[in-house]
Amino acid sequence: MSERQREIARAALELLEDRGAEAVSLRAVADRLGVRLNTVSWHVGSKAGLQDLMADEIVGEVSLKRLPKEWEPRVRELVRRYRAALLRHRDGAAVVAGTFVAKQNTLGLSDALVAALLDSGCGDADAAWTAWTLVYFTLGLVAEEQSAPDSDGGLAAAVTAGAFPALARTVAHIGGANFVERHHFGLDLILAGLRARIR
């Protein structure tokens, strides 16, 4: 990423914090920087290109330093840092989820995560697919957390024991606000599945 692209990405992230993902456009970024629209377009190409730069800047906040040596604590710490980076930005998960970025920061995190999984002794495909599962599970849960309404949206009232008995039994645990605990649970489940495949 060039210095000019980094400047554009940071201006776009400032807009994201101020007004949300829907307000971010090439024109809005140009206005914020006090430059012409074609100047921004020259460096990012399109709205998708701008979103790619924003996503890579967000992922770049994930430090790859001072990680645990053992594979599983390293995976957990990388995923924890990734989640924290997404949460640091308004609509962070929505921005990153809409991209397929082959840029330095995103590739660096992906490589570190896959390397940690390979150190478990699993096969190449299992490492790649487990990394994919961890990333998209985290993106999905953070997206829910960042857009969750204050109430359950009427779910509890809509679920009755007669019509939806399984949901009625578990509704207190569906869409609950304890996102940290839910993330830990999902991470445990994914890594337990990987360990079972290695044996």
Image: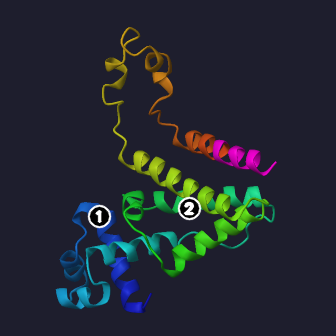
Is residue 55 something that shows in the picture? yes
Cα–Cα span, label 2 and label 1: 22 Å
Residue 172, given in percent of the width and then of the height, sits at 48, 23
Residue 192, given in percent of the width and then of the height, sits at 71, 44
Please tell me whether residue 194 belongs to the stretch shown in magenta: yes
* Kind of residue sitting beneath label 1: Asp
Graded by Cα atoms within 10 Å as few (under 14), some (14 to 19) or many (20 or more), the crowding at tag 1 reads few
* Kind of residue sitting beneath label 2: Tyr
**181 sits to left or right of 8:** right
Q: Is residue 166 above or below residue 2?
A: above
Residue 64, given in percent of the width and then of the height, sits at 65, 72
Marks counted in the figure total 2
Q: Secondary structure at mark 2?
A: helix
The quarter of the picture where the N terminus appears is bottom left
Depth check: give the residue in front, 196 or 64.
196
Q: Residue shown at 75%/59% (left/top)?
A: 122
The circle on residue 18 is 1
Please tell me whether residue 191 belongs to the stretch shown in magenta: yes
Q: Quadrant location of residue 107?
A: bottom right
Residue that numbered label 2 is attached to: 82
Q: Residue shown at 31%/19% (left/top)?
A: 158
